[in-house]
């Protein structure tokens, strides 16, 4: 069988039932599914098999991207990295469904971490799926002086095992060749009887195993009750893995820690860990906050979009619809959907989102991210989150909308609620942060500290109160720390672009909706009416000029607009701090609001949204009474 | 004693993991009741990092407090 990704099939005779993913496949195609633990180099295998035409799409109902491609007459499908097949989180559910639909599985395992990885392998074998095992990172195993008896491993598992060094392309062709020999491995005899019983009720062995292991979703699909023996099955499987590993792997000599292991220890040590963290955060700030947010955005937003795109589109539209008419204002006016919105999306948001996803991918692929989660776990657990929440919180400083979507990776609903509320209330996004920085820089040191300290205090207070008042318990940190590795550029870029694309696709329509709403408000005079309506609060309670209310309504649409609206006003230093605190705590942009409603549902979204009004005007006002 | 009292560098045997969800996850990572592990490092007031062969796992302090371990009497 040869990799033949460039063949374009024109027949539309039938479609391969590939779960719910949309790839046009012939009827009799085989689905080859790539499965493995996180960080085992699976993507290199996928790229080798897939050829040119890769379809990357979100798995229905999730933000989890699934790559699939033609492989000759067959299909090759990638799955998210998992430690076992079950339904503990979104990634596992997606992987589970793809695996359940697989005809053949290529299981990539890390030769250095066989004890961990073979658990999944044996589970796949117990599912009765035809399997080929790719034993990856053979070079690292050698570096650790681990000797692995590949033939014995293949005998014990009952499936072909191919040693590989994927990044050097070693063994990939052999894996491809072994595909035709993929077969069911040696299953646990103890499970056999139970599986047989369940098989008659659910019809397929992989699904029968899922039900026996207590998977509530698969059980529900077949109208049976989930099994209660998960722990027993898992313990037995663990014993089988340990037994196999003890026969197959020999540690030749105990080697002293490699540089990578020493570094891995260093980043977690109390003395060096925090300075390294500070250095990385500083590097992140220099890259995203200075290089991209100022230099790159300066070119994309000012020079390209405002310098060329906006004059161009105005010159095209102006002869047809004058900018002075209502429709003209909506199309090409100050907040026009063809001017401001397009500039904002392509000139500002896209470079920033891409930069954040690049930084995130580097931290992920290097293995630093789980260590960062470990370092900050204590801090985050005091506000009802665990270390893993560091990802959405960092992303929040880039774009709150993007960050709100990533709260899906958190373990419980409770954590998702807390993280979302903190993001929506107390984390200023990069667009807003840029304007805030300029305004703060003008009034000097003590006020900067006052602003930052106050917002931080609000963040901690809000988190603590939510954590104390929300029912239930947050999930504890329990994560695998992969070895530190130099990230591969191609992988980092591919990951960042895929995610940035997915985000832009999801958020773009809402930015247009938001711009439309404000344009209409401006044209109909509602914007002015609004400012007058809020005048008592703005002037009386917040002690700001009346026009500040316009800034707040603009803040409804785009967070930085709110802050930018303050530029033109002549505010005292104390007024600036009050205004900035209010605008920071005030509702996030309209795109973020839409995602908030989508992610958390009406019942949570409305209190979170209204809460930000109370927080912003309440705390802003209190600060005003003290300062002004 | 419990896992949160273990010092960095000490070798211990896992005796009991009461939380069923955590136990499942531990088993997948390669650590079960009866496994011998080394405390790789400890974040002050924070997670305990365990190491077994080449596998490293970070465990939040609250969870570590619930896991019963026993010091290896004559550590290698």
Image: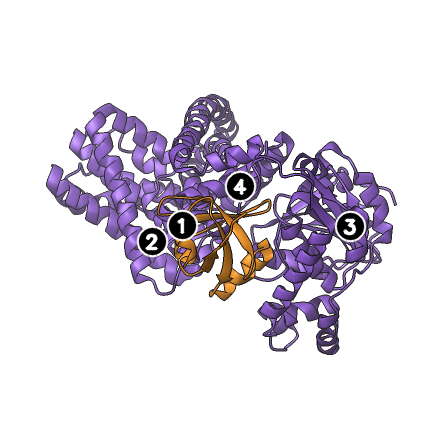
Spatial CA span between label 1 and label 4? 15 Å
- Label 3: chain letter: A
Callout 1 and callout 4 share a chain:
yes
Between A208 and A510, the one nearer to me in the picture: A208
Q: Earlier in the sequence, mark 2 or mark 1?
A: 1
Determine the colour of chain B.
orange
Q: Secondary structure at mark 4?
A: helix
Callout 2 and callout 4 share a chain:
yes
B47 relative position to A106: left or right: left
Callout 3 and callout 4 share a chain:
yes
Callouts 3 and 4 close, C-beta under 8 Å: no
- Label 2: chain letter: A
Callouts 2 and 1 close, C-beta under 8 Å: yes
Residue that mark 3 sits on: A75
Spatial CA span between label 2 and label 1? 8 Å
Residue that mark 2 sits on: A609
Spatial CA span between label 2 and label 4? 23 Å
**In the figure, A321 relative to A387: above or below?**
above
Dot label at residue A593: 1
Q: Earlier in the sequence, mark 3 or mark 2?
A: 3
Where is residue A469 shown, x and y percent of the image? 30, 62
Where is residue A249 shown, x and y percent of the image? 71, 47
Where is residue A256 shown, x and y percent of the image? 58, 34
């Amino acid at each position: 069988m040869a990799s033949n990704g460039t063949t374009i099939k024109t027949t539309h005779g039938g479609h391969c039932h590939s779960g719910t993913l949309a790839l046009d496949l012939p009827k009799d195609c085989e689905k080859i599914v790539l499965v493995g633990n996180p960080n085992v180099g699976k993507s290199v295998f996928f790229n080798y098999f897939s050829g040119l035409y890769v379809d990357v799409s979100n798995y229905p109902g999730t933000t989890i991207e699934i790559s699939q491609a033609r492989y000759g007459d067959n299909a090759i499908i990638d799955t998210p990295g998992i430690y076992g097949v079950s339904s503990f989180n979104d990634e596992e559910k997606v992987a589970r469904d793809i695996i359940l639909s697989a005809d053949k599985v290529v299981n990539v395992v890390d030769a250095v971490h066989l004890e961990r990885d073979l658990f999944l392998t044996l589970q796949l074998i117990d599912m009765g799926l035809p399997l080929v095992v790719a034993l990856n990172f053979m070079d690292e195993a050698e570096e650790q002086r681990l000797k692995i008896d590949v033939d014995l491993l293949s005998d014990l598992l009952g499936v072909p095992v191919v040693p590989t060094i994927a990044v050097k392309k070693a063994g990939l062709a052999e894996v491809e060749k072994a595909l035709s020999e993929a077969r069911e491995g040696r299953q646990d005899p103890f499970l056999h009887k139970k599986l047989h019983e369940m098989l008659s009720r659910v019809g397929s062995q992989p699904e029968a195993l899922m039900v026996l292991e207590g998977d509530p979703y698969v059980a529900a699909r077949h109208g049976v009750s989930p099994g209660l023996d998960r722990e027993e099955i898992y313990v037995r499987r663990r014993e089988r893995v340990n037994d196999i590993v003890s026969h197959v792997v020999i540690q030749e000599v105990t080697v002293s820690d490699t540089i990578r292991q020493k570094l891995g220890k260093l980043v977690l040590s109390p003395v060096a860990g925090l300075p390294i963290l500070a250095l990385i955060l500083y590097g992140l700030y220099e890259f995203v906050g200075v290089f991209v947010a100022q230099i790159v955005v300066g070119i994309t937003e000012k020079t390209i979009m405002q310098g060329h795109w906006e004059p161009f589109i105005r010159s095209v539209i102006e002869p047809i619809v004058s900018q002075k008419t209502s429709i003209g204002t909506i199309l090409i006016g100050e907040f026009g959907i063809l001017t401001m919105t397009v500039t904002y999306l392509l000139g500002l948001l896209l470079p920033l989102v891409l930069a954040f996803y690049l930084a995130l991918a580097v931290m992920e692929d290097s293995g630093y991210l789980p260590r960062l989660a470990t370092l900050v776990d204590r801090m985050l657990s005091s506000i009802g989150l665990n270390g893993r929440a560091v990802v959405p919180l960092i992303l929040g400083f880039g774009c709150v909308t993007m960050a709100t979507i990533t709260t899906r990776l958190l373990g419980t609903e409770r954590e998702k609620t807390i993280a979302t509320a903190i993001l929506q209330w107390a984390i200023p996004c990069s667009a807003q942060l840029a304007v805030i920085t300029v305004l703060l820089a003008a009034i000097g040191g003590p006020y900067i500290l006052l602003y930052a300290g106050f917002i931080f205090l609000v963040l901690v207070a809000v988190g603590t109160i939510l954590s104390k008042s929300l029912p239930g318990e947050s999930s504890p940190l329990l994560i695998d720390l992969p070895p530190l590795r130099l990230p591969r550029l191609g992988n980092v870029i591919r990951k960042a672009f895929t995610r940035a694309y997915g985000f832009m696709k999801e958020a773009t329509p809402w930015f247009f909706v938001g711009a439309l709403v404000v344009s209409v408000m401006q044209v109909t005079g509602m914007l002015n009416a609004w400012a007058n309506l809020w005048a008592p609060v703005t002037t009386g309670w917040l002690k700001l000029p009346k026009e500040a209310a316009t800034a707040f309504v603009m803040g409804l649409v785009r967070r930085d607009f709110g802050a930018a609206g303050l530029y033109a006003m002549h505010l005292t230093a104390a007024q600036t701090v009050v205004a900035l605190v209010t605008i920071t705590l005030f509702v996030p942009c309209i795109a973020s609001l839409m995602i908030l409603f989508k992610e958390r549902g009406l019942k949570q979204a409305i209190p979170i949204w209204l809460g930000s009004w109370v927080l912003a005007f309440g705390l802003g006002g209190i600060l005003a009474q003290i300062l002004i | 004693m419990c896992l949160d009292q273990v010092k960095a560098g000490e070798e211990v045997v896992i005796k009991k993991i009461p939380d069923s969800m955590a136990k499942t996850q531990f088993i997948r990572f390669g650590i079960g009741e009866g496994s011998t592990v080394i405390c790789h490092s400890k974040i002050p007031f924070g997670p305990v990092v365990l190491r077994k062969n080449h596998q490293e796992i970070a465990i939040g302090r609250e969870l570590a407090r619930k896991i019963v371990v026993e010091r290896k009497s004559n550590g290698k």
